[in-house]
Structures are given as C-alpha cells and as structure tokens.
Amino acid sequence: MLVAEGGGAIMGVGPVTEAGRIGLNYVTPEARFRGVGKAMLRALEAHARTAGAVRCTLESTETARRFDLASGYRKDGAPIPMLGARA
C-alpha cells in the first residue's frame, strides 16, 4: 500500500501486489488534477516492477476511467461502482 501525503494530509492511497495488480488508485478530490494520481500510479508500477511483475493490471471506477486510459491502460471489463453509487 502506498500513501501520498502533502501538507500534513493524506492525498491518495493505492495498493499493489507483487504480481502487478493495482487496486483502486484513490486520490482525494482536493488533490485531483495536481499530478498526485499520476505520481501514485507511476510509484505503484515501479513497486510492481521491482517485485518482478512484467505487466500491471488496474482496477478502475467510472470516475477514474479516463485518467487510466490516458495513462496507457486499456479497457478490460466494467468499471467498479463507487461505494453508495448506483450500478
């Protein structure tokens, strides 16, 4: 699990397995569009590479889908609904 911090506050979190499976790369609304999500994703990928993964897969929400596609991932299933959101 990686955590992004700034100004004494948590700005984002994201889990990654040694096999390269990245869970939801969550960034707080206040940290969006400030490079936090991109930095988190690159750090998660680097951790997976260091652990020996040859490729990464990424879980995504509808909100993050555009970001994930722009980051080089491709669609491979339905996005995960947000907690409390209608599917």
Image: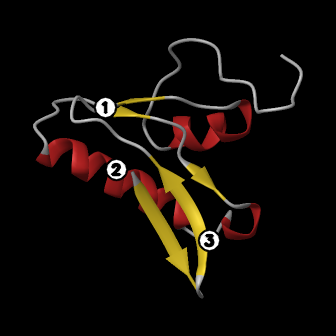
Tag 3 or tag 1, which sits nearer the N-term? 3
Q: Are marks 1 and 2 in contact (CB under 8 Å)?
A: yes
Say whether residue 50 is left or right of residue 10.
Answer: left
Residue type, mark 3 in image: Arg
Residue at 22% across / 28% down in the picture? 19
Residue at 52% across / 75% down in the picture? 5
Image quadrant in which the C terminus is located: top right
- What's the CA distance linking mark 3 and mark 2? 17 Å
- What's the CA distance linking mark 1 and mark 3? 23 Å
Residue 47 x, y percent position in the rendering: 23, 50
- What's the CA distance linking mark 1 and mark 2? 9 Å
Tag 2 or tag 1, which sits nearer the N-term? 2
Residue for badge 3: 34
Displayed quadrant of residue 18 = top left
Label at residue 48 = none
Q: Is residue 76 above or below residue 68?
A: above
Residue type, mark 2 in image: Leu
Displayed quadrant of residue 55 = top left
Residue 36 x, y percent position in the rendering: 54, 66
Residue for badge 2: 44
Residue for badge 1: 56
Say whether residue 35 is left or right of residue 65.
Answer: left
Say whether residue 32 is left or right of residue 21.
Answer: right
Q: Is residue 19 above or below residue 44?
A: above
Q: Secondary structure beneath disc 2?
A: helix
- Mark nearer the viewer, 3 or 2: 2
Residue type, mark 1 in image: Cys
Between 10 and 71, the one lying in front of the other is 10
Q: Are marks 1 and 3 in contact (CB under 8 Å)?
A: no
Say whether residue 79 is left or right of residue 5.
Answer: right
Q: Residues within 10 Å of mark 2 (few under 14, many from 20)?
A: many
